[in-house]
């Protein structure tokens, strides 16, 4: 007699998709940089913003995020374009090849904000925001809407193929501005501002940061140089060179936070007369991929470093190097 066949307890659950290897993701992104269809420089800005947000929003254990928001992206896009809106010679650099020779809409709005809130080309973004917070919020609303309307639904299209290999979103190119406006005013509505990174993409972007960032910088500079008939090698430093922001205002509070001791050697900062303590960033060890910098929350090195509050990106104070 044939034994009865066991009953199936529901349908089998398919295993979750395996994350793409980092190099496979890199190949996709390079293909996107070569073939993506954009008249403005938005694709470069969005890719760099995703890299930055994955680095800056790591969990305490170093895990990269799997969820971002359109508001986070808008804040980062304004930060990236801010130095680009300084005048090159006597004019701002054009960042769109659209008809009529006009400026990219996001860049044009940032230029207007700079003209209203910045005293000159050296004004840091944080200072301009402090001067005109309401105007800055309106700028973010506009930038967020433009990202929702254009680059985010279209970024992952290569040739005629659309493959969501980086992220998934819950809207299409037919999204309505009134729905986004209701969300921005805190009135609810159907719009969902979440950007769901595909499995493994956040961690892969962190690992690929040192490979992708210089490539994106260079291609962005080439695009701007072509639009403005300039030399890309001169432009790359202008567009992406590190902007030194005065840190006098934060030195005192950080010294207090560190109880008056050097972050590296734990010696009293006041014990070296005539030297001003240095202030700089400290990249978490879990994100540095071998760089000789240390996570503020990791165990001390040999010789004893003081523990400090952990965070995705911190500033710390230490003794100035001996002359």
Image: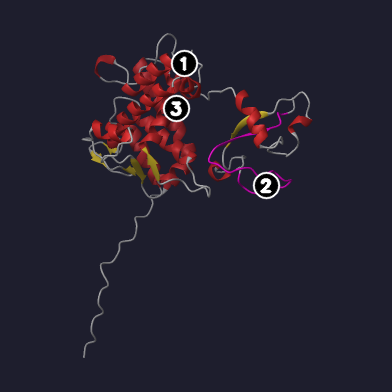
Q: Residues within 10 Å of mark 2 (few under 14, many from 20)?
A: some
User: Farthest residue toward the front?
Assistant: 187
Residue 306 visible in the displayed image: yes
Residue assigned mark 2: 300
The residue located at (37%, 37%) in the rendering is 30
Residue assigned mark 1: 118
Is residue 57 shown above or below 252? Answer: below
Q: How far from the left and from the top, in percent, is residue 223?
A: 36, 23
Where does the magenta region start and end? 297-321
Q: Residues within 10 Å of mark 1 (few under 14, many from 20)?
A: some
Q: Quadrant of the C terminus?
A: top right
Quarter residue 176 falls in: top left
Q: If you read the primary sequence from the N terminus, does the residue marked by circle 2 or circle 1 appear first?
A: 1
Residue assigned mark 3: 79
Residue 36 visible in the displayed image: no
Front in this rendered view, residue 173 or 223: 173
Quarter residue 44 falls in: top left
Disc 2/disc 1 C-alpha distance (Å): 42 Å
Is residue 1 shown above or below 137? Answer: below
């Amino acid at each position: 007699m044939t034994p009865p066949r066991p009953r199936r307890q529901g349908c089998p659950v398919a295993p979750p998709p395996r994350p793409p290897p980092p190099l496979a993701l890199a190949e996709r992104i390079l293909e996107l940089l070569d073939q993506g269809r954009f008249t403005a420089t938005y694709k470069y800005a969005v890719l760099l913003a995703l890299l930055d947000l994955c680095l800056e929003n790591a969990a305490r254990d170093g895990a990269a995020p799997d969820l971002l928001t359109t508001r986070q992206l808008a804040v980062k896009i304004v930060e990236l374009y801010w130095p680009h809106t300084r005048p090159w010679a006597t004019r701002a650099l054009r960042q769109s090849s659209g008809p009529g020779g006009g400026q990219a809409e996001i860049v044009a709005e940032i230029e207007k904000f700079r003209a209203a809130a910045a005293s000159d080309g050296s004004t840091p973004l944080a200072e301009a925001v402090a001067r005109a917070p309401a105007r800055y919020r309106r700028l973010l609303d506009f930038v967020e809407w433009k990202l929702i309307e254009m680059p985010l639904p279209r970024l992952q299209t290569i040739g005629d193929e659309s493959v969501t290999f980086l992220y998934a979103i819950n809207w299409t190119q037919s999204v309505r501005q009134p729905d986004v406006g209701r969300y921005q005013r805190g009135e609810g509505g159907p719009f969902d501002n979440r950007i769901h990174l595909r499995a493994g993409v956040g961690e892969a972007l962190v690992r690929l940061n040192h490979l992708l960032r210089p490539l994106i910088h260079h291609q962005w500079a080439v695009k701007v140089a072509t639009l403005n008939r300039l030399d890309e090698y001169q432009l790359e430093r202008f567009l992406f060179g590190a902007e030194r922001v005065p840190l006098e205002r934060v030195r005192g509070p950080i010294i207090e936070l560190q109880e008056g001791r050097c972050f590296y050697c734990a010696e009293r900062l006041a014990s070296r007369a005539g030297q001003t303590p240095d202030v700089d960033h400290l990249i978490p060890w879990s994100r540095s991929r071998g760089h000789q910098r240390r996570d503020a929350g990791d165990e001390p090195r040999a010789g004893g470093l003081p523990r400090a509050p952990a965070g995705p990106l911190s500033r710390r104070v230490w003794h100035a190097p001996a002359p």
